[in-house]
Image (cartoon, grey):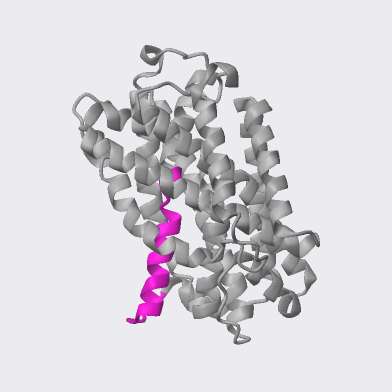
Amino acid sequence: MITGAADDDPSAIGTYASAGAKFGLGFLWIAPVLLPMMYVVVYLSAKLGQVYGKGLFAIIRDQFPRWVLYPTMIGAFIGNVIEAAADLGGIGAAMNLLIPLPVPLLVAGTAVVIFALQYFGSYTLIRKIFRWLALILFAYVIAAILAKPDPMEVLKSTFIPRIQFNIEFLSIVVACIGTSLSAYVYTWQSNQEVEEEILKGRRHLWQRKGATDVEIERTRRDVLTGMIFSNVILYFIILATGSTLHTSGQTQIETAAQAAAALEPLAGPAAKWLFAAGIIGVGFLAVPIMTTSAAYDIVQGFGKKGSLHAKPSENKFFYVRTGATLLSMRRMWPDRSSGGSRCRLSWKARPKALQQIPDREPQFPVSQSSCLKW
């Protein structure tokens, strides 16, 4: 559930809202198409973490030469920092709709809260907070219901794709693929499996290696549930914006906050508040996951240990995570526009689809290793 919710970060919300506004209900088919893609890759990441007993980049370091490891690691780190910066801007812009304060001030406050959670929070506390934050995404289901879509048109558009062979349409398709298959999702899922093992008292690698059939089946159900949840939210975001913004002619939506503001005159103030609340809530979930994933990548890529269970004073991993958070904050700071806030998110998502090729490529040869018990 946490991984699935993090996949619907403010960047993703902006992309899906843009797709719904531009192409209406005719874009609903993308949700069932993306589901098997997301499930397979995240399930693979989870199983690698379970069977090897270590995180994704620790596995890549063991199995691949350095010329594969380092470019992949650096690309994932840069991508995570840039997306975390975009999401911080998205949170600030969404909060600005509800609280009339300058966006940079709101972003700074958000970063302080995230930093405090990372510094003072135990893994158990962080997990509990993330689970509750995931539930706020159901606000998009309510927002879509408030939009009062035509049920027959919704049903038809879900199962009958309306493909357009033009640059604008295909670029949005690529953006949706890129934002739903984000590198931080793979890293987080594999490492969360390891953190759960440590929580059970399996602190040594030899205790964590291997997995029973029951454990693998639990992981399969867990990942499937999370990816269905993620795609249901994706679906209702497109449904909400497609039923309101597209039908009213407001097709140029570039940010999630812009979509929230535009919904108010069409579906009422409740729709705006729900949409903005979803951006803020999932942003507080996604940004620490992104910066933590960036830290996992760097620490494991250099052969060091890092865990959310360790104390900051004993853990180099913590300092990398802090650095990633500060870099994300600095990355979005120059843009002081509350409308932009470095949050033209659908455009940021398009190159991410190409980034996934090197990020995912090492997973598949590793998964076929004869020493693994699947």
Q: Nearer the viewer, residue 312 or 21?
A: 312
> Residue 311, can we see it?
no
Q: Residue at x 52, y 59 (%)?
A: 12
248 lies left or right of 238 = right
> Where on the picture, by quarter, is residue 127?
top right
Indicate whether residue 167 is drawn in magenta: yes
Q: How many marks?
A: 0
- Visible in this render: residue 6? yes
For residue 253, side relative to residue 368 (left or right): right
**Residue, far right:** 100
Q: Is residue 349 above or below residue 322?
A: below
User: If the image is split into quadrants, where does the C terminus sit?
Assistant: top left
The residue sitting at 26% across, 26% down in the picture is 62
Q: Main secondary structure of the magenta part?
A: helix
Return the x and y of residue 266 as percentages of the image width and height: 72, 80
In magenta stretch: residue 179: yes
The residues colored magenta run: 160-184
- Give the quarter of the figure containing the N terminus: top right
What residue lies at 55% left-to-right and 56% top-to-bottom?
86
Q: Locate residue 60, reporting x and y percent.
A: 29, 32
Rendering coords of residue 97 (x, y %) = 75, 64
Q: Residue at 69% of width from left, 40% of height from top?
A: 112
> With 52 as the anchor, is 89 left or right in this view?
right
